[in-house]
Amino acid sequence: MKNKIWLVILLLFSIFIHAQKVKVADKYFRDFAYLNAIELYKEALKKGDSTKHILSRIGDCYYNNSDSEQAYFWYNKAVHKYKKIHPEYIYKYIQTLISLGKYDKANTWLKKLKILQQNSKYTRGIENINLEKFQELSTPKDIHVRIINLESNSKYSDFGGFEQNGNLYFSSSRTDDRIKNKKKVYKWNGEPYLNIYQSIIDRIDATIVVKNITPITSDQINLKNEHEGTLTITNDGKTLFFTRNNINKRKKTSYDKEGNSNLMLYRAKLQNGQWTAIEELPFNGKTFSTGHPALSPDEKTLYFVSDRKGGYGQSDIYKVAINDDGTFGTIKNLGNQINTEGREVFPFVAKDTTLYFSSDSHINLGLLDIYKSNILHKKAHEDVEIKNLGAPYNSGYDDFAFFVNPANDSGYFSSNRIGGTGSDDIYAFDSYKCKQILTGITYNKHTSEPLAGVTVKIIDETGKIINTTLSNKNGRYIFREIPCAKTYSILATKTNYRLDSKKFSTTTINENEIKLDLFLMPLIIKKEIVVNPIFFDFDKSDIRADAAYELENIVSVMRSNPKMVIKIESHTDSRGSHRYNMKLSHKRANATRDYILSRGITTDRVPSAIGYGESQLATQCGDLKEHSCTEKEHEENRRSVFLIITDD
C-alpha cells in the first residue's frame, strides 16, 4: 500500500513538473525565445502531450524563425489531427504551403478556410483561389507611398493627369468661361462635357501646387458638345494624341467609364503656340470606339483601347507601329494574357517599358484596378507577369489613368474613391523605400559598463524575427533599413546574462535614427548565480510557473559552464514553528533541485540542497520586530539561493 501511495505521489509530481514546463515554454514564447520554447514543448510532446496548443505553438516557433519546412511539418500535424482549429493556424499553414511551392494543396486548404470562416479577416476579399496573386494586392511592406488629392480637383470629374516639362495636362468636366460649351450638360452623368486643361505644377518640399489652370491652347480642341480627353504628348512637346467623342453624331455604347460613345483618336501639331492641324487617325471606326492613347518611350509605337471586333472582352488594349513618315502599321491586339472578357483600359508605358493599365477582371480589390506588366520588355524565356499595384493605389472603387514621371517614383492616378472632391479626382503620389536606423549600446546592468558580443534581434508585431546582429567591442549595435511606420520588439541576449527586451515604433520620416540602449543583468555575480527570487506559495513546496521560469536561467548557466557545481539553500518565512519551517525548507530545496535535475543537469553538479527554515530571514519582521510582516515581506523570505562551489 505504501508503495502505491509513493507511485501516485511520483505520478502527480511528474504531471505537475510537466505542466510547469509547458507554462515556462509559453513564457519563453512570449519573450520571443523560440528555441528555448521549442525544447520545452518537445519535452512535453515526449510525455504524450500532443494537444493543439503544443503542436501549433511549435509550428509558430518555426514560422516566426522563417523555417517554412519545420513550420509546415508541425502545422500539418495540427490541422490533420484536430478538426476544430483556429483559422489563424490554417492561414499560416497555407503560407508555408505556398512558400514550399505546394500550390495545389494551398488552394485546397484555402477553400476549406473560406467555408470555415466566411467574411472573416482570413478570407475577406479573396475572390480568386490563387493566394499568391491575391497577396500582391497588399502594399509592399518596404515601400512608403504618399497619396495627395490635388487641391485643383473640382466638384466634377477630373482625371488622366499627364505631366511634361513642368506642365500638368488633364481632362475635366468643370465649367470655364473660356470654353464655348461651358453651359452644356452631358445627360449621361449630369455633368458638363469633358475638355482638356493644362496647368503649371510646382513641387515645394512635400507640397504640390497646381496653378494657372487654363483650357488647352487651341481653337480646334474643346469643341461644343464633344468629350475630349485622355491624351499623350511626344517628348519634344510638338505632337499631341487625344481622344474625342461627338455625342450628336454617334451611337451611345456602354463601353467607356465616362459614358463616352464611339471614341476616336486624333493627332494635333503645336504651331506658333497653338494646337492645330487636327487629324483623325486612320484606324478609327464608326461602329466601335478607339481611345486612351499612350506612347512607347522611343515613340515608335502607339498603344490604345478599343472595343472593335476580334477582341477578347468588352474593351482590349492594342498597339500600332508609327512609321518614320508619320503613317501607321498594322494594328495588333496585346493578347489574352493582358486582355480579358472584361474591360482593359487606360494604358501607359513607363520609361523602362513597363506597361500600366486598368482592368476590372484580373484579381482586384473592386471595379477598375491599376496593374503593371512586363509584357513589353520580357525576354523570350520569361513568362508574362501581371501585378495588381494594390493599396493605396487601388481601392474598392474605380482606379485608373496611371502616370509615372520618367525621372523619379512620382506621378498621378485617378479614382472615384470615397473622400474625393468630385466624381473623379486626380491623385498625386510619390513612393520611396522609407527606411530608418536603430542604434544603441548594450550594457552590463550590474556594472553599467558597455557589454560586447550581445545578440540583438528585431521582432515584428507577429513575433517574427526579421533581423539579427551582434554588439561590437564597445557594446554598440546598429540596424539599417528598418521599414517605417511599424511597431517592433528588440531582444538582447547573451550567455550567462538575463535578457532585455523593449518595444519601439518607427516613424514615417525617412532615414530617421532611433536610439535605444539595452541592459542585461549578469546571472553570475561573484560566487552566486543571481536570479529573481524563487518564490513559493505559503505552506507549500511546489515549483510555481514563475519559479520554473527563473530556474531555467540556472539551467542555462550550468549548461554553458559544464564544470560548474552549485549548492542550493532554501528559506521560509517566519510563520509556523521553527521545526515545521525547517522541514518545509528542506522540501523546497529538494523540489528546486529536482526541477534542475529534470532538465538534464547531473546529480553530481548539485550535491547539496539544504533548507534553513526561518533562521536566515531576508526581511526582519513579525516576532523579531515591532511590526507584523506584510504578505510581500513574507514572500521575500520564502526564497532559494544558488551558491557556486566550483566552476573550473
Image: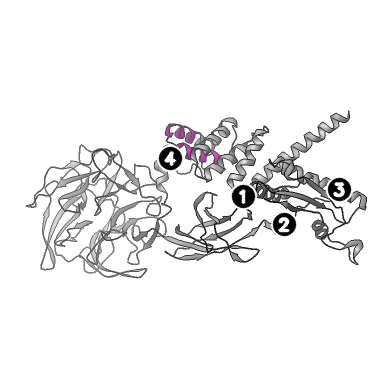
Q: Earlier in the sequence, mark 1 or mark 2?
A: 1
Q: Earlier in the sequence, mark 3 or mark 2?
A: 2
Tag 4 and tag 2, C-beta contact below 8 Å: no
Give the Cα distance between marks 4 and 3: 60 Å
Give the Cα distance between marks 1 and 2: 31 Å
Residue at position x 37%, y 68% in the image: 206
Is 394 situated left or right of 529 in this image?
left
Q: Residues within 10 Å of mark 3 (few under 14, many from 20)?
A: many
Tag 3 and tag 2, C-beta contact below 8 Å: no
In front here: 490 or 640?
Answer: 640
The residue that mark 2 highlights is: 527
Closer to viewer: mark 1 or mark 2: 2
Q: Amino acid at mark 2?
A: Lys
Q: Residues within 10 Å of mark 4 (few under 14, many from 20)?
A: some
The residue that mark 3 highlights is: 584
The residue that mark 4 highlights is: 131
To which quarter of the image does residue 6 belong? Answer: top right
Give the Cα distance between marks 3 and 2: 26 Å
Give the Cα distance between marks 4 and 2: 57 Å
Q: Earlier in the sequence, mark 4 or mark 2?
A: 4
In front here: 530 or 191?
Answer: 530
Residue at position x 83%, y 45% in the image: 587
Q: Residue 594, image x and y in percent?
A: 76, 42
Q: Amino acid at mark 3?
A: Leu
Give the Cα distance between marks 4 and 1: 29 Å
Q: Is residue 608 visible?
A: yes
Is 472 situated left or right of 646 in this image?
left
Q: Earlier in the sequence, mark 3 or mark 1?
A: 1
User: In the picture shown, does residue 493 fall above or below 314?
Assistant: below
**Tag 1, which secondary structure?**
helix
The residue that mark 1 highlights is: 30
